[in-house]
Image (cartoon, grey):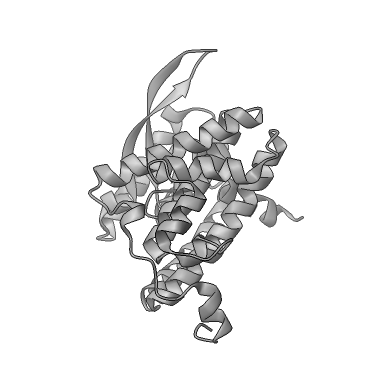
Amino acid sequence: MNEIDINKNMFENIKHIDENGKEYWKAREIMRALEYSEYRKFLPVIKKAVTSCETSNVNVNDHFVHVADMVKIGSNTKRKVDDYKLSRYACYLIAQNGDSRKRVIALAQTYFAVQTRKQELLEKEYNELTEDEKRLYQRNLTKKGNYTLNQTAKKVGVKNFDKFHNYGYMGLYNGETADDIAKRKGLRYREDILDNMCSDELIANLFRISQTNQRIKNDNIKEESNANKTHYKIGKVVRKAIKEAGGTMPEDFPTPKNSLKELEKHNKLK
């Protein structure tokens, strides 16, 4: 793997997904990736990037969101620290305003410039998709997300994956298991519930999947029972976020008329 690929993976590995399925990075994680040792020395770079954003007549609040995170400072102690949620465009501006003497900065500039342009095209293309095409797109993302989550869960001792995923569903769906969801949707035995969700319901599940994967890794979760509890907890956190945002609860989304399997079988999707 060459240097560019290594740095690409580094930036992708610290990417997060929010409750709306949108990607973001945390400033303190980007700081370490760009080889800055202290946050106070990194803040001037963020401020320059914010100024560049303002100068370009782009809404700063869409790309730089100030947050306060709780971080561990001891065995059982946490404290609140300032941070930012950054869009891909924000990361690009930060790279452009970073220390150009650093090799990693030059690589970041190239990577985020190319990826920002790709993202602009993807968003435009996504908005032009039909609902069924959006479903297929989000379903593919959940397949990739579940594969990654399963690999992470396996490493910490999970063996019963049906039970593990049920914990996530129960947290997100107010106690419903996968079988309960399937029955409510009127699905046939063993029919995949994810193939019978609208795009917004899939996005909610993708957020649950990605955040569980991150929590298991970041908190160094061990043993199957703890992984199950974590999946349940994250499901509830996502549910609470949807409720507080005034969104539609996942169980209240209508079930699409046709499953994705049926649509693919009849060549209704490209």
Q: Nearer the viewer, residue 224 or 116?
A: 224
On screen, residue 55 versus residue 189, left or right, reads left
The x and y percentages for residue 52 are: 33, 53
Residue 11 in sight: yes
Horizontal and vertical percent position of residue 53: 31, 54
Q: Which residue is found at the position 43% from the left and 71% from the top?
A: 134
One can see residue 45 in this view: no
- In the image, residue 250 lies at what x, y percent? 36, 53
The quarter in which the N terminus is drawn is bottom right
Going 59% across and 41% down the picture, which residue do you hit?
164
Front-lying residue, 192 or 46: 192
In this rendering, the answer to whether 250 lies above or below 187 is above
Seen at 39% across and 43% down, the residue is 238
Which residue occupies the foreground of this view, 113 or 224? Answer: 224
Determine the residue positioned at 31% across, 56% down. Answer: 252
Looking at the rendered structure, the number of numbered marks drawn on it comes to: 0
- Counting from the top left corner in percent of width and height, residue 83 is at 38, 34
Query: Foreground residue, 71 or 181?
Result: 181
Where is 138 relative to 29, above or below?
below
Q: Which residue lies furthest to the right in this view?
A: 1
Give the left or right position of residue 54, taking residue 76 as reference.
left
Q: Please identify the residue farthest to the bottom as the structure is shown.
A: 267
